[in-house]
Image (spheres, rainbow, N blue to C red):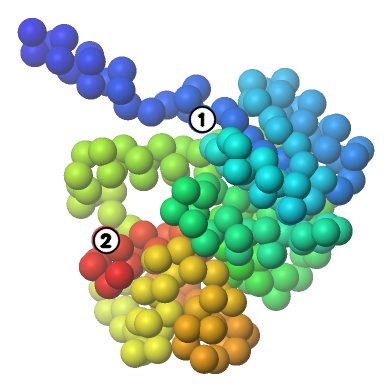
Amino acid sequence: MERSATSATAMKEPSMKDYKRLLLIDDDPNLILLVKDYLEFRGYEVTTAENGREALDILEQDIPDMIICDVMMPEMDGYTFVEQVRQTERTGWIPVLFLSAKGQSADRVKGLNKGADVYMVKPFEPEELVAQVESSLKQTIRWKEHQAKGGDNSSRIQVPFDVQLTPTELKVVQFVARGLANREIAEELNVSQRTVESHVSNMLGKTNLHNRTELARWAIENQMA
């Protein structure tokens, strides 16, 4: 009986085969075709959109396991789109990978501060894209397993023990944990969006975390939010 219970529990745990639905957003039809074909060849189900506005319409009907998004697009660019995605609990958890022709450090920082989890520069190798997708999906699986098990300390976000936030940084990270975009946080605190981006960047440096998603998890796990 004990073995059966264990088997039943294992069947309920998420695995990579359960996370195969991707939303690909880019205004370049050639890139869409090539990336879609490659990802589908690797076993993923891919829905496509030409810009952020069209993608938001898709998200009203269907929630993917991950979003791959160009930055510079007509109608609605990637930055605005991701800010919209991060505003609601329904979509705020979805991992987002930015694709961009801009590869400067400042561009990467901006992309991550806007809410992306991964930033890749065009042109890129298809194998690297798949590796980044699989890494992000595995992190999602680990996080959901962590939640299902009630928060085992072994899987908690790890940061240096002596991290200290300023009062303003604490306010900012609380809003980040609630899923607010930098623009909304700026409005709440009556400061510029650039100031908020600077606070987020400083906290990522202090904590050695990689993106806003990890920053939000850290804040929630340590009851700052």
Ranked by sequence position, the earlier of labels 2 and 1 is: 1
Circle 1 packing at 10 Å, graded few (<14), some (14-19), many (20+), is some
Q: Quadrant of the C terminus?
A: bottom left
Q: Secondary structure at mark 1?
A: loop
The relative height of residue 108 versus residue 152 in the rendered view (above or below) is below
Residue 170 screen position, x and y as percent: 35, 81
Relative depth, front residue between 127 and 165: 165
Q: Is residue 7 left or right of residue 109?
A: left
Residue 152 screen position, x and y as percent: 20, 47
The relative height of residue 168 versus residue 116 in the rendered view (above or below) is below
Residue identifier under label 2: 221
Q: Is residue 25 visible?
A: yes
Residue 177 screen position, x and y as percent: 39, 66
Q: Amino acid at mark 2?
A: Glu
Q: Secondary structure at mark 2?
A: helix
Q: Residue at x 22, y 14 (%)?
A: 7
Q: Residue at x 26, y 38 (%)?
A: 148
- Tell whether label 1 touches label 2 (CB within 8 Å): no
Label drawn at residue 84? none
Q: Is residue 215 visible?
A: no
Q: Is residue 1 left or right of residue 193?
A: left
Q: Amino acid at mark 1?
A: Tyr
Circle 2 packing at 10 Å, graded few (<14), some (14-19), many (20+), is some
The relative height of residue 203 versus residue 178 in the rendered view (above or below) is below
Residue identifier under label 1: 19
Q: Residue at x 91, y 38 (%)?
A: 30
Number of callouts in the render?
2
Residue 59 screen position, x and y as percent: 61, 43
